[in-house]
Amino acid sequence: MRLLISGATCVLPTGQARVDLLIENGKILGIDPPQGASVDETIRADDLVVIPGVVDDQVHFRDPGLTHKEDLRTATRACAKGGVTSFLEMPNTKPTTTTCDRLAEKLALASEKCMVNYGFYIGATPANLDELKAAKRTPGIKIFIGSSTGDLLVDDQQALERIFAETTLPICAHCEDEATVKANSLRLGGGSKYEDHSQIRDEAAAVIATKRALDLAIRHRHRFHVLHVSTAAETEFLRDPQGLITAEACPHHLFFNVDDYERLGSLVQMNPSIKTSADNEGLWRALKDGRIQVIATDHAPHTLEEKQQPYPKSPSGLPAVENSLALMLDCVNAGICSLESVVHWMCDAPARVWDMEGKGRIAEGYDADLVLVDLGKKQTVRNENQETKCRWSPWDGVTLQGWPVRTIVGGKTVFLDGNFDESIRGTEITFDHAKGGYWAIPNNDA
Ligand code: DOR
């Protein structure tokens, strides 16, 4: 089966170019192939832009165990709609993904249910070092250095030292200092208003934990990815001369700040908490000067009923996979950043951070995971149109310009103009950790 995508502007590793793409057996066979190459199907895409499929390296899809919030089918429909063709999911499901057996079980479940490509982190506990050492089919190790949703937590210094010293997989972490959060909570009597969340999980909590994790990574010379950086202060420590450290920002930390509690209440309650407008600006600066390389969503759905409980019963987290690309394309249209930067932050960089094979670029031999984007399309986010099982979005009512209109996974169209092909299945993402991570691969060397 040979497919030609013709007439579109493509975002290649070297920049934008009007080229045809020839796809065979789920891979990009040729860029601008000679005229007259025999094909089975041609997609005319004259007014569209083709980008690599988005690689979201931080999501919580709740399957197994918490499937009243989300499951792998609803989550991956949302991915397909949003232009996310590959995701890496966190281990705080029920049961937690903290052994190689559970990892294999999750991968088996995903092969049945996922409409896009999938990978799963193995979670660290204070006592599962042998599992972390043995794990193979995974991007890396997730450590909650500071608790969040669920009960995964490794706060003990000795346990952390051993994980960084004795394992070889890349590590990422949720960095909020447990002691600081507890002390703040005690001071505020546990908190009673949604905005108390940002005082309990404050700047100091984020800075202390991020510094602690960076110290571990540098001393043990261990590759480390800082998840969801939320403060300008943390970005000051992200200059890494040794090529070990990468970092990530989430749309909610770029677009929301403490002023939004009044309008959105618990819908903008998440961990790490939202901070100030100066922090929004600091995160943008760090993305633009390369201290933060990745944008990911931390998609963390809870039902509206759960979210509407009073603080502190209201759970932390919000859904975002179906709107993250549009949010960033809207920024391109507003002149805030370039399309090439968005592709770097959301496609190429996460694929490189986690040593994915064949992902993140439009280049010969790479997987045909592609998104056809209409940069002129204006659409309003509406709760009732959300594919995520929780059916709400903090961006409800917001009109964005620039939307994915067709999502292709492994050469097959899984989403087209509002319709899904439910028969399509993604595949297990493979990781070649010998590649050496983000810093080992030059930007434009496909
Ligand atoms: O707000 C959050 N919710 N942050 C996390 O780190 C976890 C997530 C969840 O799983 O609900």
Image (tube, rainbow, N blue to C red):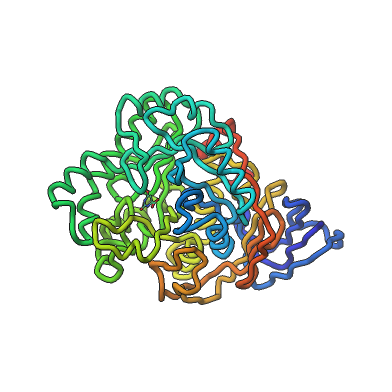
Whether residue 211 sits left or right of residue 49 in the image: it is left
Please state which of residues 68 and 298 is positioned toward the viewer in this rendering.
68
Image point 54% across, 31% down: which residue? 135
Kindly identify the residue that appears in the image at 52 percent across and 56 percent down: 71
Give the quarter of the figure containing the C terminus. Answer: top right
User: Total label count?
Assistant: 0
Residue drawn at 73 percent across, 70 percent down: 44
Position of 162 relative to 87 (above/below): above
On the image, the x and y values in percent for residue 116 come to 61, 54
Measuring 39% from the left and 31% from the top, which residue is drawn there? 217
Q: Position of residue 175 (x, y in %)?
A: 33, 42
Quarter location, residue 31: bottom right
Q: Which quadrant of the view contains residue 316?
A: bottom left
- Residue 295 in sight: no
For the residue pair 187 and 57, the one nearer the viewer reads as 187
* Residue 394: quarter of image: bottom left
Is 401 on the left or on the right of 230, as rendered?
right
x and y, in percent, of residue 97 in the image: 48, 39
User: Relative to 61, is 417 above or below?
Assistant: below
Would residue 62 be found to the left or right of residue 210 on screen?
right
Is residue 153 among the parts visible in the rendering? yes
* Quarter occupied by the N terminus: bottom right
Residue 38 at x, y percent in the picture: 87, 60
